[in-house]
Amino acid sequence: MIYDNPVTTPAHHAPRFSSTAAHGPSRDAAAAHQAGVRNALETGYAVLSRGGSALDAVEAAVTVLEDNPAFDAGRGSFLTSDGRVQLDALLMDGGRMKAGGVACVERLRNPIQAARLVLEKSRHVYFVGPGAEQFAHAHGMALIDNAELVLDRERERLAQARPARPPDSPTCPSPAKPFMTTKARRPRFQPIPTDSTRMIPWRGRPRRPR
C-alpha cells in the first residue's frame, strides 16, 4: 500500500472548554493537545510514506506523545500518591500474533520503545517494574532519574487532590473499634496423653486408644 496523500482534513467539531482553568482545560491547553496529536500523526505518516511498517509508525508516533508534556503519556504524566511517575505501554503485531508490554516503569523515558523490545527480543509478553527496566537497559535503553519525568504542574495538581488534614491529627488514625476479631480455634486433632503417638480426631474429650 502506498501512502502519498497527507492528512489535511480539519476537525468537524470544535470542543467547548471552560473559560476558568480551575474547571477545565484552557484554550491554550486544547491547542497544545491538538498540535501534539497532529505532530504524532505526521510523524507516523512520515514513517509509512518511507515504506516503514505499521509497528515502526506506531512506535514513532507514540514516542512523540510520550515526549510531549501536554499528554499523560510520558514526561508530565499524572503522579502517584508518593509523587512519582509510573508508565505503561503495550504494542501488538496482529500479523504475527505477538505482543509486548511494560508496566509500572519509572526510569524509562519512552516505555513504548521498551514494549517494542519485549515484542521483538523476548519470548515473554509483559515485564513489570524494575524487571522491565533491567530488560530494556540490557537491550540498549538508557535509564533516567524519575525526577526528569515530573513537572511542577503535576506536583501542584497532586497537592490540590490530596484531602486537607486537620492540624495535630494523626496520619493514620486508629479506628474506634477493631475491624475484626480473632478467636482461638479448637485444635482439630488432640494427642492422647499416654505413651501412644497415634493422633485421634478431637470430639470434645479424648478417647482411649484401642
Image (tube, rainbow, N blue to C red):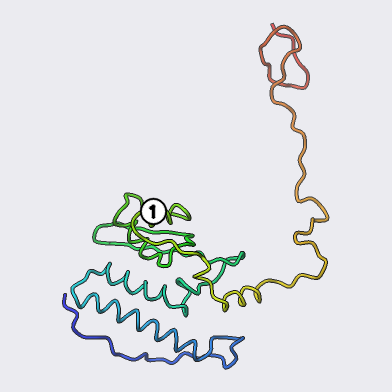
Q: Is residue 166 left or right of residue 136?
A: right
- On the image, the x and y values in percent for residue 111 come to 41, 64
Question: From the viewer's perspective, is residue 204 above or below residue 57?
Answer: above
- On the image, the x and y values in percent for residue 64 come to 37, 76
Q: Nearer the viewer, residue 170 or 7?
A: 170
Give the residue type that dot 1 points to.
Answer: Phe
Quarter location, residue 65: bottom left
Query: Mark 1 highlights which residue?
Result: 135
Question: From the viewer's perspective, is residue 8 above or below residue 56?
Answer: below
Q: Quadrant of the C terminus?
A: top right
Q: Is residue 165 left or right of residue 71?
A: right
At 33% from the left edge and 58% from the top edge, which residue is drawn? Answer: 117
- On the image, the x and y values in percent for residue 68 come to 43, 78
Instruction: Say what secondary structure mark 1 lies in.
Output: helix
At 57% from the left edge and 77% from the top edge, which residue is drawn? Answer: 152
Q: Nearer the viewer, residue 184 or 36?
A: 36
Question: From the viewer's perspective, is residue 133 above or below residue 19?
Answer: above
Q: Is residue 58 left or right of residue 24?
A: left
At 39% from the left edge and 56% from the top edge, which residue is drawn? Answer: 137
Q: Residues within 10 Å of mark 1 (few under 14, many from 20)?
A: some
Q: Quadrant of the N terminus?
A: bottom left
Question: From the viewer's perspective, is residue 76 above or below residue 181?
Answer: below
Quarter location, residue 23: bottom right
At 44% from the left edge and 89% from the top edge, which residue is drawn? Answer: 31
- Number of dots carrying numbers: 1
Q: In this view, which residue lies farthest toward the left?
A: 2
